[in-house]
Image (cartoon, rainbow, N blue to C red):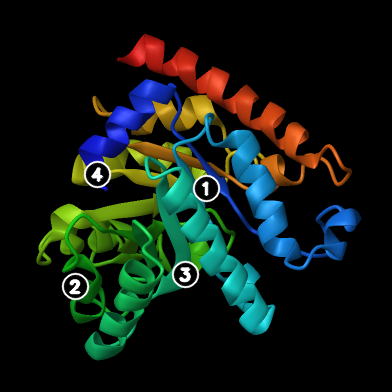
Amino acid sequence: MTTQQLTEQIKKKQSFLCIGLDVDLNKIPQHLLQEEDPIFAFNKAIIDATHHLCVSYKPNTAFYEAYGIKGWQALEKTIQYLNEKHPDIFTIADAKRGDIGNTSSMYAKAFFEDLAFDSVTVAPYMGKDSVEPFLAFKNKHTILLALTSNQGAFDFQTQLVDGQELYKQVLETSKTWENSENLMYVVGATKAEYLADIRKIVPKSFLLVPGVGAQGGNLQEVCKYGMTKNVGLLINSSRGIIYASNQEDFAQAAALKAEEMQKEMAIILNHAL
């Protein structure tokens, strides 16, 4: 999927919502545990109830790897279902990969070719040759960790190196890499005040913004500093939507929470575009 196609979907649906499919068997409704594949059953119900309200889904692969081969098979079934039923949805493998070149190439093949995700999150710590193998795939996107929403982000990301915060050096350096036009960036919603500076460095790139909702990020603040003429934002919400209820009405409850965010986004878009 191209960024133009993603932007078209955002305008069509009046939404830039990304729903995180982070499935914890201890949190899903208990009746689903009787299903042959509880993880996929949960995901399918969430997708069926919310696909018209969002433009993206983001499974965090840790929530699938934790359950071994059955978890990975559930992830495979989930992405296949999305690609078959909703090819207009932008899919994100939240895997946070990144390793030496030949290993990164294999990671890229796993997510872009075998599973057919549109994008994957990647850690930048090992630098250019660990990221460029992901960038080599046409119409696929590498979402680089830039400034994350967790407390530990201050351990390294905001530290000054030669007078400049490290995350800013990551942003600037990444723009020099081959096929850097395929880059997007993770910027936590709890760091909304940093977005103005980030937009000076990457004025047109899409930003994946976790942390709105359960982690306390403010949607209005994020949009004030981070939105571009082409929107340029994917706002992720996971727990606040998918675990709105742990009863049999869980999918309907998730849809209501997603609709709340979509309506707020529609108002913002109508004023901004």
Type of amino acid at the residue the image marks with label 3: Ala
Q: For the residue carrying disc 4, how many other residues have a C-alpha within 10 Å: few (<14), some (14-19), or many (20+)?
A: many
Q: Label 4 sits on what residue type?
A: Ser
> In whole angstroms, how far apart are the C-alphas of marks 4 and 3?
20 Å
Closest to the camera, between mark 1 and mark 2, is: 2
Label 3 residue SS: strand
Q: Quadrant of residue 230?
A: top left
Task: Check disc 4 and report the residue beneath it.
Answer: 205
Q: Residue 74 vs residue 113: left or right? A: right
Cα separation, mark 1 vs mark 4, equals 16 Å
Q: Report the Cα–Cα distance between label 2 and label 4.
A: 17 Å
Q: Residue at x 83, y 41 (%)?
A: 245
Q: 86 and 187: which one is in front?
A: 86
- The image's mark for residue 169 is none
Q: CA distance from mark 3 to mark 1?
A: 14 Å
Q: Who comes first in sequence, dot 2 or dot 4?
A: 2
Q: Which mark is residue 132?
A: 2
Mark nearer the N terminus (1 vs 4): 4
Can residue 163 be seen?
no
Residue beneath disc 1: 210
- Neighbor class of circle 1 (other Cα within 10 Å; few <14, some 14-19, many 20+) is many
Residue 219 place in picture, x, y as percent: 53, 30
**Residue 258 location, quadrant:** top right
Q: CA distance from mark 2 to mark 3?
A: 16 Å
Residue occupying image coordinates x 50% and y 62%: 153
Q: Residue at x 33, y 84 (%)?
A: 99
Write down the residue under mark 3: 95
